Image (tube, grey):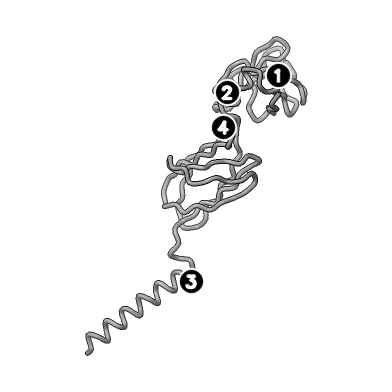
Amino acid sequence: MLTDVRATVKTVAAILLVETLSICGCSKRPEMLVQADDHPVKLSIDGSQVGTIDSNGFQKFGVSRGEHVVRAESLDGYYEWQEITNVETDAQKVIKLILSPSNNLLRAAYNRKFDVRVNRDTFLKDDYCFPLTDHIKITSGSLVEVSAPERIASCGRRNGVRVRYNGRVGALDSAELAFASK
């Protein structure tokens, strides 16, 4: 009979522990809260598609601790984002997506399916992020042509876009450009 009482006490203690952990949230897996920018996206974590998020929407995803490759692509395939993120604790990890033009968009712009304008005053740059020696200024709203169908390494990142402006070829950061379909 003493053995039965001990077993019952252990069972009740285990149930109380599980209930306590579920009430305090201590038994939850770590979560990523992913917020989209202006583009609706399909999201993958570690190579597996986990869902879609509406433009400016957000969604939670349960993950394990450790490094994860998080990739987002706009539903039209023209914008993308990727990052390796480390989830170290059970606290919620917040990720705000800021998509960049994909090579698909640059190929379409290269093939003249999009107008490309500079969205702020800037200078045409060389591949090392320095203004060209003759300091060619491009004012906000100016039309440029994409002169290479893929992103280039510029300023130490892969967000460079080779453009032509007034007969000169140089590089601009993709964040300096706005794309509009013709």
Instruction: Tell me whether the residue at label 4 lies in contact with that at label 1, contact meaning CB atoms closer than 8 angstroms.
Output: no
* Amino acid beneath label 2: Ser
Residue 60 vs residue 16: left or right?
Answer: right
Q: Nearer the viewer, residue 140 or 114?
A: 114
Q: Amino acid at mark 3?
A: Ile
Q: Are marks 2 and 1 in contact (CB under 8 Å)?
A: no
Query: Mark 3 — residue?
Result: 23
Q: Is residue 71 left or right of residue 35?
A: left
Q: Quadrant of residue 150?
A: top right
Q: Nearer the viewer, mark 4 or mark 1?
A: 4
Give whichever of discs 4 and 3 has the lower sequence position: 3
- SS at mark 2 in the image: strand
| Residue appearing at x 44%, y 73% in the figure | 20
**Residue mark closest to the camera, 2 vs 1:** 1
Residue 113 pos. (x, y %): 66, 21
Question: Mark 4 or mark 2, which has the lower sequence index?
Answer: 4
